[in-house]
Image (cartoon, helix red, strand yellow):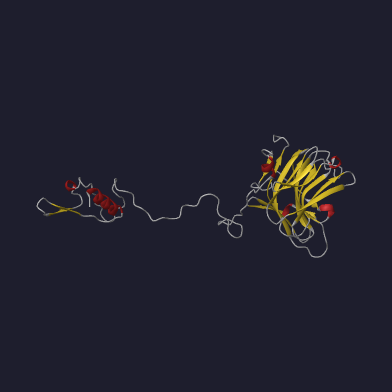
Amino acid sequence: MTVDELEQLIRKLVAQGVTVLLFVLGPGGELVDVTPGDEAARPSARSSVQSPGEDTAPPDAPPLALAPTDPPATGDPAPSDDGTTAGGEPVTTDGTTAAAALGWGEPVRTDDFTDGTSGWNIYDGPGHDGNGRRTPDAVSVQDGVLTITGDGEGNTAGMAWTEGSQQYGRWEGRVKAPASDPSYNALLLLWPTAENFPVGGEIDFMEMMDPSRQTTDIFVHYGADNSQIDGSVDIDGTEWHNWAVEWTPDRITAYVDGEQWFETTDPTVQPPGPMHLCIQLDWFPQGGSVQESTMQVDWVRQYTLDGGTS
């Protein structure tokens, strides 16, 4: 064994906490016992002796190799089988948005409900067409997700994003709704800020009427006689999807997850003035016992047509 090999072996043993005693033969073959601290005998081999219990290796000793361990976790927590993180928080992602797919630019308004329902006008009064009641008690927010709950008595909720109303523009929201009672419809819609329905029009760009939430409809209301045109798309509304509408002077187009599923260019259906976004779980009583139903909204965003400020 060469001196260098011996030195490497000694360093390895020292680093592992092994007590090393170096024995050197003298010129006549006699044994010389080199003990710790005998500096005179150690320079050529640059050996080091570490006593048991010392916590640190000598400055020039190689680092102690540790057994491999799992690297620390980085990035987002992995979801569990029930759709939550290890800490129990819901896992949601944006998915594909119409805004990203079509280059709508930056939103002029956005709400991810981390501040509750600040900025919303929550209805408190009779329900849709005078049926049931809309009450703020039916609105809740947890972990940045808005939930509207309709009970067996027709107590439900709706809310309006009236600030920033605009004529023409784009709106998008991320929504899911579990299978429900047939009497509850989940909606994202544009409502006339002048409160002059039906003349002011209405664009229900996401209306889940199907209680299994497997088909979603659009209804464009127009005219003094409340005429309507409509369309539908087959999609699993019990899962998160991004529902969007683009309203221009020439057309009204609906999207889900960045894909167009409805469009009209009929000028007679155009709303005559500014509108704003509403979120509603509306009660259409069918008779009999009513199952509690809900809808959830992760976020909503509003854009102008030119991608600038409104």
Residue at 79% in and 42% down:
252
Q: Position of residue 228 (x, y in %)?
A: 85, 48
**Residue furthest front as drawn:** 1
In the displayed structure, does residue 286 sit left or right of residue 279? Answer: right
Residue at 86% in and 41% down:
268
Q: Camera-side residue: 21 or 200?
A: 21
Q: Is residue 118 visible?
A: no
In the displayed structure, does residue 27 sit left or right of residue 282? Answer: left
**Residue furthest bottom as drawn:** 288
- Quarter of the view holding residue 168: top right
Q: Is residue 303 visible?
A: yes
Count of residue discs: 0
**Residue furthest right as drawn:** 225
Q: Position of residue 276 (x, y in %)?
A: 76, 42
Residue at 17% in and 48% down:
41
Q: Please identify the quadrant where the C terminus is shown.
A: top right
- Quarter of the view holding residue 83: bottom right
Q: Position of residue 39 (x, y in %)?
A: 19, 47
Q: Position of residue 189 (x, y in %)?
A: 77, 47
